[in-house]
Image (cartoon, rainbow, N blue to C red):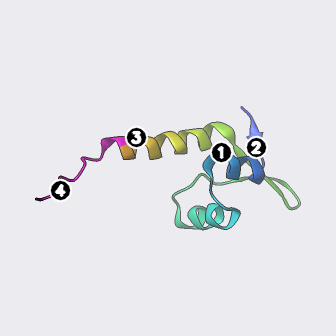
Amino acid sequence: MKLIRIAKVSELTSLARATIYKYINEGVFPKQVKLGGNCVAWVEEEILEWIAEKIAQRDSQVPELESA
């Protein structure tokens, strides 16, 4: 299990720091692990699973047919 900091989370997800914290508050993104003081990190596997879920959601959507 590997812990990663906010810069790596942002890099992996292409989300801004503010968006990451917004999604956490909305309950739609993995919560951070407090390491002490002001230091937090995320479980890398949880972030990768979140990304995989987003891809699966995209792939399971039925494309809308354009009407002529």
Overall secondary structure of the magenta stretch? loop
Name the amino acid type tagged 3: Ala
Marks 1 and 4 sit apart, C-alpha to C-alpha, by: 33 Å
Q: CA distance from mark 3 to mark 2?
A: 23 Å
Give the residues in magenta: 59-67
Task: Indicate which disc, 2 or 4, sits on the residue closer to the N terminus.
Answer: 2
Disc 4 is placed on an element classified as: loop
Closer to us: 9 or 67:
67
- SS at mark 1? helix
Going by the numbered disc 4, the residue's amino acid type is Glu
Q: Position of residue 16 (x, y in %)?
A: 66, 61
Q: Which residue is mark 2?
A: 4
Q: Mark 3: few, some, or many residues within 10 Å (few <14, many ≥20)?
A: few
29 over 22 or under it: above or below: above
Identity of the amino acid at label 2? Ile
Secondary structure beneath disc 3? helix
Of labels 3 and 4, the one closer to you: 4
Q: Residue furthest left?
A: 68
**Kind of residue at disc 1:** Leu
Residue at the image position 53 percent from the left and 61 percent from the top: 27
In-image side of 36 versus 26 (left or right): right
Measuring from the top left, give residue 32's x and y in whole percent.
69, 53
